[in-house]
Image (cartoon, grey):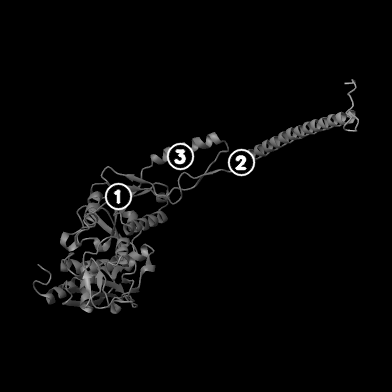
Amino acid sequence: CNTPIPEDKSSGEPPNRVYLSHQASANSTARTISISISISICLFFFFFFFKLCVSISLSMEALSSPLHLTLRPRHSCPVKWCSSGSVLLFPPCLKTPAKHNNMGIIKASVAVEQQTQKNITALIRIGTRGSPLALAQAHETRDKLMATHSELAEEGAIQIVIIKTTGDKILSQPLADIGGKGLFTKEIDEALINGEIDIAVHSMKDVPTYLPEKTILPCNLPREDVRDAFISLSAASLAELPAGSTVGTASLRRKSQLLHKYASLNVLENFRGNVQTRLRKLNEGVVQATLLALAGLKRLNMTEHVTSILSIDEMLPAVAQGAIGIACRSNDDTMANYIASLNHEETRLAVACERAFLLTLDGSCRTPIAGYAYKDDDGNCIFKGLVASPDGIRVLETSRKGLYAHEDMVTMGKDAGKELLSRAGPGFFGF
């Protein structure tokens, strides 16, 4: 390194200055790189240990805090198919807090709880049709039972069993053409008698005037609004529908009263299906209007579709419209006591009066019959009854007033039926 370097005559600068300058620059760069690497390594270990400390802190906090486990969504409704083809719907499960801080113990606890749930035997199995309205009525019954009897509020104590009826299976024909009675109740009653369900929830207007052997119906829930609703996208009322407009309804009762007052309208008879299906057909322009029970729309929270509500004088309701009935086996005192606790006596008496009227007329799906009993401001029973020809040309009406007591009201219903039978004459009812 001390060997002299020959001078470069052309540069005019001492060659050693140039050499020493390059060497200093190289040393400086090496030191800078070394320092940067050292700093980077220090920062890496600093942040690594910082994150490690934070993670440990959070983990300790989580283990020391209460932990809540939800086995199923709160509003879910698990489904179980029966061998007969019916469906079991379990009530929603509850949010269960964990009682241990150890995660292994918590998992074991959940497993035990789920296993216990599988082994739960329902105290009551509710039989119902599967339409949205029928399920709403079954859920109303379930909720009332749970609120009234603490043992039924336990998870899995009540199951809902969906059963398809003849009326649900055959949708291509009008009900009058299918014939027979109990189109929406027969299969449910059979399941009740065979012990597949413990109680049956029915729309009372679907229940025949007779009950199958080995069954009783001791309970009616509080009655909903009995009136009919007018629904249309083009008119505010029946009176505003243009001549030739088509109204969809599967009810001969509605058809006959409609044509009696508005002969210029047409009626599409086989306008069947659940509430949602009929509203869809209306929106698609199949008909210009339809009539539905206001009670069903209220139970489904669908009253926003109502255009106007028909008064009792404009459209007398069906017998027992808006009433829910609950049946059980005649030898099952436990179930009888459960459902009797839900009975609304004013509704039960009104339904008994109306069904006595229907029984006397021996009405069926082929007969337009309407009847309504209610309590007036003085506490008396007012009954209004109606029979009509399917084309609406002949409409016969009657009314009664008497004490709001079971025996008096049943007598009123029978007496009103006998009167209309006499006035109608032979052949009016097709028998």
Q: Are the residues flagged by discs 3 and 1 in contact, CB closer than 8 Å?
A: no
Number of the label disc, if any, that sits on residue 62: 2
In the image, 230 versus 76, the foreground residue is 230
Q: Residue at x 17, y 63 (%)?
A: 176
The amino acid on which the numbered mark 1 sits, given as a three-letter code, is Asp
| Residue 423 left/right relative to 304 | left
Q: Amino acid at mark 2?
A: Ala
- Mark 2 and mark 1 in contact (Cβ < 8 Å)? no
Which circle, 1 or 2, is nearer the viewer?
Answer: 2
First in sequence, mark 3 or 1: give its number: 3
Q: Are marks 2 and 3 in contact (CB under 8 Å)?
A: no
Q: Quadrant of residue 104?
A: top right
Percent of width and height locating residue 285: 29, 67
Q: Which residue is mark 3?
A: 113
Helix, strand or loop at label 2? It is: helix
Q: How many neighbours does mark 2 have within 10 angstroms: few (below 14), some (14-19), or many (20 or more)?
A: few
Does the rendering let one see residue 286?
yes
The residue under label 1 is 198
Q: Residues within 10 Å of mark 1 (few under 14, many from 20)?
A: many
Left of 119 or right of it: where is 30? right
Q: Where's the C terminus, which quadrant?
A: bottom left
